[in-house]
Image: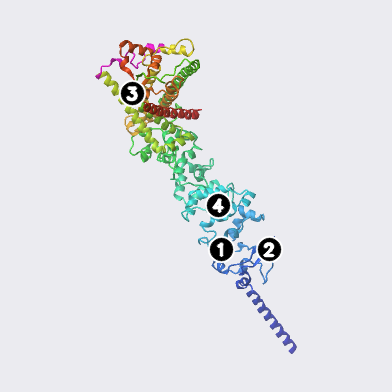
Amino acid sequence: MLKTLFTFSFLLFFTSHSALAKDDKKADLSNEVCLECHADPELKKEVNGKEISLFVNKEIFAKSVHGGNDCVSCHSDITEIPHAESLKKADCSGCHEDAVNIFLKSTHGKAFTAKIPEAPDCATCHGKHDILPKSDPHSKTHPLHQIEICTSCHLNPKIAGKYNLPKADKIEDYKLGIHGKGLLESGLLVSATCVTCHSAHNVRPKTDPESTIYWSKIPELCGTCHLGILDDFRKSEHGMQWQAKSPKGPGCITCHSAHRILDPVGLEFQLQIPNLCGRCHTIQGRSYKDNFHGQVTALGFIQSATCADCHTAHKNLKASNPHSTVHPSNLKKTCGNCHGIVSASYITYDPHMNPRDPSHNKIIYYIWLFFMIMIYFVFGFFGIHYLLWFIRSMVGFARGEFKVHGEGETKFIRRFTGPHIWVHVAVAFSFTVLAITGFTIYFHDSPAAQFTAKMLGGIGFMRYLHRLSAIITFGYAFFHIGYLAFRYFRKRDKNLFRGPESMIPTLKDVGDFFRNMRWFLFLGPVPKFDRWTYWEKMEYLVEWWGVPVIGISGLALWFPKVFTLFFPGWVLNAAQVIHTYEAFIATGYVFLFHYFIAHLRPETFPMDPVIFTGRMPLERFKHERPLEYERLQASGELEKYITDAPTKNSLRWSFTFGILMVIAGLLLMIGILKNIF
């Protein structure tokens, strides 16, 4: 009995001691026990030849989101101290099962499951013992630091190159975009980060229908921040296409791009709008660029209307829709946003007019056709005329037929007076500036035009240059009309309309043309000319045609609201066609043919200063205008026109100004021909 009692007491004592021992063993797995070793900064181990720190900063860990957890809650395979040399990685799924399951199905998770060494895991992004809430500015996953996590792999050339990760320029584009600048430069935490679009755990390629950046999900993704815009977009033609998936309708990144998202009201984005819209709307995009709005927008004139200004950026509807901003009932308001109060005629102007298409407007088509015929006739007829002249002049120069006049001569004859000289200076200057500024606008998308616009101070200043030159043009035109009226009504000068002093062509001029053609073809002598030659009269009449045609059409474009008080809006479209193609004719004729005959033929090369000095060597006068010389000599008036040689200063000024105009004109013609052909 005693023996039995002793045995029972012993077993009871042993059992209770063992239980206490177990309790003591559990206490040995506390954080304090773990930190007795891991609080040592020098604690390290070697894995595959790489030294790894096992140090855990007690204070940092205590402040982390896991600071209240036991070490063994994550390192669950530790059952004793000291623990095994090699432990499993901490398994986050015990607490974060949903997040881990999503992660394992992602691109990152699949790489992790495949045991790719560089594959990210939870600790890669969140940290280990220093995990803080993402709202904490010191957290690795705080919006200000998220890009650092992503770039640690995506900007690492060893990792990015090895696994063909998305290119680094996407991240650089993000930094340059409005989201990146908003976050990294302005510190705006509402700005989108990598995680905002790609998600934190469900990162997938954009081709995966489950991806947050799959094309059909992007508008709703952007709409989480831009809700009002999403509502407008859903109602638009683009949005309805997107919702119907027929075809893959345009989404946010179609226009705004995925990473380098520009400020939508900024200059760079505004100037890109026509190109963005033109990628899909090719016909409308081309017609927009061919009209005034598109031309000046391409040169940086941000005040000009773009596609979004008329059609809206996100709520664009068909013109037939009564709610559309371009529906006829709404055009007054839409146009009025820029142009103020406009008339009913004004809004019938077509910003997408194609003059080559008769279905748009037959009148404008026939105007375009007329000018095309004129262009082919003028450049065909005069091209042959002056080409033959050039060949004949070169042969004559080689034969020594032309004497160089002016060198050492003391007797000169006055050909032009002060008013003639200054009018020609005004003509040369204003015409050259009009041509340069006008064709810079017309060929707006060429590198030469972009360069010229910058050199001239931008499109804003160019507009003033063009209009100032137009005012000069009207000024000399009205001055010339007044001068002719004065001569006719006050001086009773009847020579304005008849006789050798008149600029009106006569039968002799027709004969001189054919006689000159015979000389070109080596079939006869040079015809004898009087004060004005047939080509000078043609140029004079062409100018009388050109100034009012190009001038009135230019005024219509300058003051469209005034003209549409009296005419329908399509008159503005017609004015643009007339202004453009008449400018082609005038510019081509002056800079090719007039410059050749006045300055570049062997007889006058490199420049004829007569129009600027008003004086011509007498010997040259006898040779080139024999009939006028004989007439003045017979009437006894020759001595009245004899004068001294021009001064060196006047010659220097003449050559400087003249050659500058010639060079500017020839460079412009090279640019025009290069863009045409």
The numbered dot on residue 198 is 4
Could you tell me how far apart the alpha carbons at marks 3 and 4 are, in whole angstroms?
74 Å
Could you tell me how far apart the alpha carbons at marks 1 and 4 are, in whole angstroms?
21 Å
Could you tell me how far apart the alpha carbons at marks 1 and 3 are, in whole angstroms?
88 Å
Badge nearest the viewer, 1 or 3: 3
Badge nearest the viewer, 1 or 4: 1
Badge nearest the viewer, 3 or 2: 3
- Label 2: few (<14), some (14–19) or many (≥20) C-alpha neighbours in 10 Å: few
> What amino acid is labelled 1 in the image?
Ile
Q: Determine if residue 319 is in view.
A: no
Q: Is residue 395 above or below residue 477?
A: above
Q: Which residue is mark 3?
A: 420
**As rendered, which of 480 and 81 lies closer to the eye?**
480
Secondary element under disc 3, as helix, strand or loop, is helix
Q: Is residue 614 left or right of residue 140?
A: left
Secondary element under disc 4, as helix, strand or loop, is helix
Q: Earlier in the sequence, mark 1 or mark 3?
A: 1
Q: Assess whether residue 502 is covered by the magenta stretch.
A: yes
- Label 3: few (<14), some (14–19) or many (≥20) C-alpha neighbours in 10 Å: some
Badge nearest the viewer, 3 or 4: 3
Q: Earlier in the sequence, mark 1 or mark 4?
A: 1
Q: Is residue 325 above or below residue 527?
A: below
Q: Are marks 1 and 3 in contact (CB under 8 Å)?
A: no
Q: Quadrant of residue 402?
A: top left
Q: Which residue is mark 1?
A: 131
- Number of numbered tags placed on the structure image: 4
